[in-house]
Image: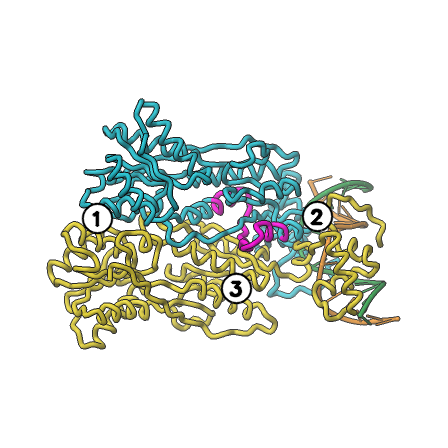
Chain colours: A cyan, B yellow, C orange, D green
Amino acid sequence: MTHDVRRAALQATLSDVAELAGVSRQTVSNAMNNPDLLKADTLERVRAAVAELGYSPNRAARNLRTKSSRLIGMRFAPAQEGTANAMMDRFVHSLVEACKVGGYHVLLFPGAGDDPLAGYDDLLRSTAVDAFVVTDTYLGNPQAVWLEERGAPFVAFGRPWDAPEATHPWVDVDGAAGTRLATDHLLDRGHTRIAWIGWRKDSPIGEDRRAGWLGAMHDRGLSTTGLASRVEDTVASGAEAAGVLLDDAGPSAFVCASDTLAMGVLKTLGRRGLRPGADVAVVGFDDSQVAQVVSPGLTSVRQPLEEVAIEIVARLQGRLAVPAELDASSLLIPRLVVRSTS
Amino acid sequence: MTHDVRRAALQATLSDVAELAGVSRQTVSNAMNNPDLLKADTLERVRAAVAELGYSPNRAARNLRTKSSRLIGMRFAPAQEGTANAMMDRFVHSLVEACKVGGYHVLLFPGAGDDPLAGYDDLLRSTAVDAFVVTDTYLGNPQAVWLEERGAPFVAFGRPWDAPEATHPWVDVDGAAGTRLATDHLLDRGHTRIAWIGWRKDSPIGEDRRAGWLGAMHDRGLSTTGLASRVEDTVASGAEAAGVLLDDAGPSAFVCASDTLAMGVLKTLGRRGLRPGADVAVVGFDDSQVAQVVSPGLTSVRQPLEEVAIEIVARLQGRLAVPAELDASSLLIPRLVVRSTS
DNA sequence: CTGAAAGCGCTAACAC
DNA sequence: GTGTTAGCGCTTTCAG
């Protein structure tokens, strides 16, 4: 069985190690995967041979045999230009990092413009990935339903807003808790007329965030009449909404559904000679790089993306374990990063 | 050969398709990989069977056989907090998109803090990836040298600054051309005293960008004495440098090595009641989301990352082709996105 | 505790 | 043009 010619340049194989260590190939395999099964000195000998040859098991062969790739697929859509949000960058990094522990890697695939399922299907059928992380649940979530039907393991980052009966595991950040944090912070600083600038009603994430502001205000018995606005997620819209609110309702503070909108508010304040923080307080959402870099520093709600990634990977591993264990979904609490605008 | 039991839930295999189409397994393989070899009607029959069974070749098996994974590895380090730069996000997306054409996917792996080579070594030895994209060449480039030695295919995003004799393929953006673009733009608008705020001298990228400013100034016979500053890449440093330059040299415009530094300049202008664009012009570098969202919009040099990704993938494919073809490295020209600060 | 045999699903080489 | 044979490198039975 050791008749094949060794070519020095090529990667060492199980057989090479076995030959060098003077054991069978199977013993080497056990040394790699079930070291407890070996006698101490045999293990030592095998380990030495592995080190000497720089052996590392061939992934393709292992994948073929074990029917798993230790790859997690994730569709990577581009950040939208003109908005402040580079959240995905941070999340992807956290995910890559979180995967390391379990020996998994992240495989990125592009989103086919038209069909949100393309890409998923290919990777699944060719057994290229073991599981998916689905991040774009806000689009109406066809992936979740479809993947569920196919029995494909996945964990979603984001709640199944439009399908509360969905049973798949998910991890999400409690947006309402975040805006409540922001609003309470402003209330504690003495503000009572706190305005809200959020997204249009058809965004459940936006409505969630709005609810946190509303709840915090009502809990203190404060009126919110005329203090809320719903607009597109652009700087211009935020600026316009801030102008209207300032004219009509005279708020002393703004809580926004995004840093982009908050930047719009800052723009209007600048135009009117109002000092952010001193005259009018502003809080954004996402703690984007913009919030960190703009002058004065923008107070913002920061999502715990590192934790989100860890929770997702934990659920992924549970889902892939045999027998599969289904952990409950989990809702994480963001924190407020206070800077000069509040 | 068709004695094995079919389990409906499992993925169809080559044999399943062959049986259904009434041909041999090899013919199905050919239909997938060399369709020209088949007779038209045979091909048609096979294709129908493939469609009916939803067959997609098993990656692991194919990888094992062909000794390639069609995966491109890339180390994904987190964006630095507190700086404006979310360039990687855009680049990674472009790379994922560019890979699609060749049927490649991007595999992300974490950077081991201490050893910049860890991660690369594992993936290479386990034949998990076919090639790498190396992005952190500015760190002194140990990866490039090491990968070169191991004969691992890779293309660098970034020139081998400290090893001009390096022969590996790379793609980079001409920073000097970018700052020259910025400086010429300001010169054309009538500015003559244009200051530079850049990074410390040990950054070759910073020196490159600085050279563009310097060259443009000298080409018009303008003095640059006292008009340059080298600082850390932070908002505070940029703000401080701007203050000193304004006091000592009275420039009417600033060209900066990064949007982060440009934000610092804007901060100082704001403090002194100077209007960006009207009183003092400012140009940043990278066209980050900050540049797009801040008020007034920050003029900035934008790297053609989409092109970079395409060029990289092209070189990667050349490198992986048999026989390998080594395209020349390529230096791309950025463009200037003009906004209100200039 | 170690070894021998079998086979995961595919493609390269060769025969027909 | 199509079928047969062999084997990629590994892990999972099952014997010893």
* Residue B293 at x, y percent in the picture: 32, 52
Name the quadrant of the N terminus of chain A: bottom right
Chain of the residue under the numbered disc 2 shown in the image = A
User: Marks 2 and 3, how far apart in space?
Assistant: 29 Å
Which mark is first along the chain, 2 or 1? Answer: 2
How many marks are shown on the rendered structure?
3
| Residue occupying image coordinates x 23% and y 60% | B282
Chain of the residue under the numbered disc 3 shown in the image = B
- What amino acid is at disc 1? Arg
Of helix, strand and loop, which one carries label 1? Answer: helix
Q: Residues within 10 Å of mark 3 (few under 14, many from 20)?
A: few
- Give the quadrant of residue B32: bottom right
Cβ atoms at labels 2 and 3 below 8 Å apart:
no
Q: Which residue is mark 1?
A: A271
User: Marks 3 and 1, how far apart in space?
Assistant: 59 Å
- What amino acid is at disc 3? Arg
- What amino acid is at disc 2? Gln
Work out whether residue A128 or residue B288 is closer to the camera in this orientation and state it.
B288
* Residue A254 at x, y percent in the picture: 29, 37
Which of the two marks, 1 or 2, is nearer to us in this view? 1
Cβ atoms at labels 3 and 1 below 8 Å apart:
no
Work out whether residue A109 or residue A61 is closer to the camera in this orientation and state it.
A109
In-image side of B106 versus D6 (left or right): left
The disc label shown at residue A26, or none: 2
Chain of the residue under the numbered disc 1 shown in the image = A
Cβ atoms at labels 1 and 2 below 8 Å apart:
no
| Residue occupying image coordinates x 63% and y 45% | A31
The disc label shown at residue B150, or none: 3
Of helix, strand and loop, which one carries label 2? Answer: helix
